[in-house]
């Protein structure tokens, strides 16, 4: 019984770490995108043209 609980806790921790890494990657990509102003303007124009 103890081994199953230990595996479940480890699995939850790994999932939390992977989600954190994914979130950090998305934020990093967003910040890198702002280093190219033309990309941001193009993206904003595409979003505005959808409406």
Image (cartoon, rainbow, N blue to C red):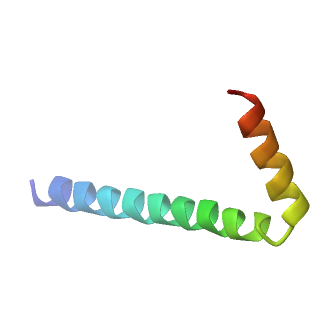
Residue 38 lies left or right of residue 48; in this view the side is right
In this view, the residue in front, 38 or 8, is: 38
Location of residue 42 in the rendering, given as x and y in whole percent from the top left corner: 86, 48
Residue 49 lies left or right of residue 12; in this view the side is right
Quarter of the image for the C terminus: give it.
top right
Residue 15 lies left or right of residue 18; in this view the side is left
Location of residue 19 in the rendering, given as x and y in whole percent from the top left corner: 46, 58
Location of residue 33 in the rendering, given as x and y in whole percent from the top left corner: 78, 64
Please name the residue shown 72% across and 38% down the image. 47
Please name the residue shown 30% across and 57% down the image. 12
Residue most extreme to the right: 38
Identify the image quadrant of residue 15: bottom left
Please name the residue shown 48% across and 60% down the image. 18
Location of residue 11 in the rendering, given as x and y in whole percent from the top left corner: 33, 56
Residue most extreme to the top: 51
Please name the residue shown 68% across and 63% down the image. 30
Identify the image quadrant of residue 8: bottom left
* Image height of 35 relative to 43, above or below: below
In this view, the residue in front, 7 or 18, is: 18
* Image height of 6 relative to 46, above or below: below
Residue 33 lies left or right of residue 13; in this view the side is right
């Amino acid at each position: 019984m103890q081994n199953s609980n230990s595996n479940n806790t480890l699995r939850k921790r790994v999932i939390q770490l992977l989600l954190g890494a994914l979130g950090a990657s998305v934020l990093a990509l967003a910040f890198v995108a702002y280093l190219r102003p033309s990309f941001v303007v193009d993206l904003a124009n595409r979003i505005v043209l959808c409406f």
